[in-house]
Image: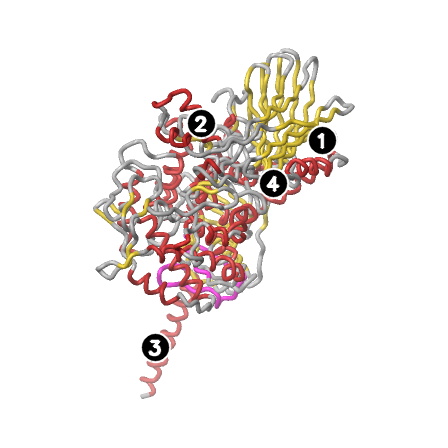
Amino acid sequence: MRIENNRINIVLCLLFICLFIISTASVKAIGYNANDSTISSLKSKVNYPEFLARHDLIWTKSPKNWYDGPFLGNGMLGSMLYQLDDHTFRISIGRADAEDHKTIGTPFISQSRLPNGYFILKTVGKITGFKGRLDLYNAETRVTISTDRGTISLRGLVHSIDMIIFYEFTTSANEEAMLKFVPLKAIAPARLQADLAVAKLGDKAPSSRKRWASSPYKYNPDPKLDIIEGYHVSKQSLVAGGEIGTAWKIKNDIKGKKQLFISIEHSFPKLTATSDAIRHLKKIQNESEESFIQRHRTWWHNYYPKSFVSIDDTRMESFYWIQVYKFASGARKGRAFMDTMGPWIVENTAWANGWFDLNTQLSYWFLSTANRLDIAESLFSKMDEKLQTFVDNMPESYGDTCAGMSAISPQTFISKFPKGKLGFTGELLWTCHDYWLMLERTMDVDRITKKFFPLLKKSVNTYLHFMIEGKDGKVHLPPTRSPEYVGSGEDCNFNLALFRWGLNTLVHINNKYKLNDSSFSTWKDVLSRLVEYPVNENGYMVAKDIPFAMSHRHYSHLLMIYPLCEVNIDQPENIELIKKSVDHWINYPGDGNSGYSWSGAAAMYALQGDGEKAGKYLDIFMNMQKLYPNNPGEIHTTTMYTETKRVQPVTETPFSLCDAMQQMILQSWGGTIRIFPAVPKSWKNIVFDGLLAAGGFEISASRKDGITEFVRIKSKAGEPCILKTDLIFDRVVGVKRSALKLLSNGRIKIDLKKGEEVILYAKGVNIAVVKPVSSNPKSWNSFGLKLDY
């Protein structure tokens, strides 16, 4: 009996040893060192002046079009520079909210952005050369114009704080900088194009232009030039009320420099714009140049370090950082939201508005992950303020419980929802999703429940108002349109996806924050009976009776895949459907794809975890004008983007590339943070810092020679943290052993309290350092306009 007991004790001892080894192995499998419990903060070694200098735009030949020249802005005012003839440069100036306010006529014409004028810079001699640089870090351009009589050195900026456009000119030899303001009539650009087309072509003019030219339209009077209190002004009165006022002053100092100070204001319904513009100039008239410039620079120097991204592909890295600069130049909190052209060129476009059937939504996607929240607020703070306007946009039959807008909107958001045939209906709900992307990353409970929730509820109520109870017991949608695709159809996937996302989000917010909303049971019931997405042998259709059967740039019928992620690869039953649908759309024969088609495809392949295909479509995007010379869209060498033969500006496409790129290095949907989820093999070295993930997490990570070195996660809200990473980590710093748990699906759950952070290290990595990846100087400064282009 004693021998038997000894045997049992030996077996138990061996079993205990085995369990201890297994337990230790499992801990090591998730890379935990139990002795590490103190935080070792991430260290940044980014020299922003040096890093951004390698992405500055460089000119060695003179720009001859707006899309080839240096561009400046402060989120409201904007300026550009390009050559008109052998003796003349144009200095374009604009203000993003200088809009008309007519209530009669075609809305996108009656409420259009309006041109106000520009300056010409005349040289004495014939222009023979041009060298320039757009300094991203300091947000200013420096140019030398050579002529056969000497040179003009030019420095320009749009002040980050004050509503001032500033240019300084220094001449040499026998050259002189002669400046003159050229006023432009405040005519809606689309109306002007229509008038010109009808005058030139008569009945042969395009039907759209004939329709625009025949719609009711009152022309604004000519601007009036004057001098008030020593300031030159151009006063543009508007027949609908209000005015646009441009004021400027030219100073000549004792050192031979000439300085041009410009301010533009818009007022409605009051007639104060001109006096307001003068007031801005008076405010800085006694300030030293050094102080004026330093205040401008300080804003930008504080802006850039909010987050950091560096990758092996230096050209794409440059493109990304130029968009970071461009967006802050075009939109900011308390100023304008980004429309199709930002605060820049107006008269060259028929799209002089905000467009919400895709353009604006695409523009804003990357900002929240990029931690550029002050810039994102240019749209979302306005949405907070304009809830009643969205309600007032609805036909009376909808009552005051619904909210919406049309596809086209001015900065005021006065944009009537369609009557009769529904047409596009998802504009506001789609924009709500952009807003939600930010709120998922800030986890601002007060704002989610008191600002966003009421807006989302009224937006979803619009769908509840026009949905149809089918004989099959399912909830259907009447005929609506998928943006720009021909024809209306029942159960349009564009609207079904938004409707389903909106309902799910209302339910989520109601449950999470215990709001006990009276409509909760309705949302749950509609969700349970909402018809499935129409599908055929090629994947998702456009609508019930409309297959995707033409090459088309919009992927609105695939919103459930991207950006909503309502259908995703965590659902095994949908993996093949996702692949088939995306492949069918992007590869459909024809030339319908455009710039954002390629960035959209890159993002959708990234969401499938396919880094090679994602990288392939980003490369197509970057080279599209070479690969597709007849394509209606073109990325210019300044990263400005245009479409149609009239070369019209549309800003959203370059910004959409940034989101696709971010999807390749960081994703956060379905409750999981994914680090480097879709990286092509060519991107062996990647560093990012300060990017935001859903749940209120700030993420940093580094990948060297194809191996992830560290991941750092900081919780700003104390939400559940689930991580998916290829990092084989040897050490964890910042949390206790009990905070980590390996889940059955290979993901890691980390218990992080609000304010806590954790760093996971690969073996042999002892410190988390953020610094730019190495790159060949020959690949720097690849944008601008150079002689070898």
Which mark sits nearer the N-terminus, 3 or 4? 3
What residue type is disc 4 on? Ser
Q: Amino acid at mark 1?
A: Ile
- Mark 3 against mark 4, which lies toward the viewer? 4
The residue to which callout 2 is attached is: 193
Q: Are the residues tagged 4 and 2 within 8 Å (C-beta)?
A: no
Tag on residue 11? Answer: 3
Q: Nearer the viewer, mark 1 or mark 3?
A: 1
Residue interval drawn in magenta: 721-747
Label 1, label 3: how far apart the Cα atoms are: 100 Å
Residue 727: tell me if it is visible.
no
Residue 736's place in the image compared with 251, above or below, is below
What amino acid does circle 3 point to?
Val
The residue positioned farthest toward the right in the image shown: 254
Which numbered disc, 2 or 3, marks the residue that appears first in the sequence?
Answer: 3
Q: Residues within 10 Å of mark 1 (few under 14, many from 20)?
A: few
Real-space CA distance between mark 4 and mark 1, rounded to the nearest whole angstrom: 18 Å
Label 2: how many residues lie within 10 Å, few (<14), some (14-19) or many (20+)?
some
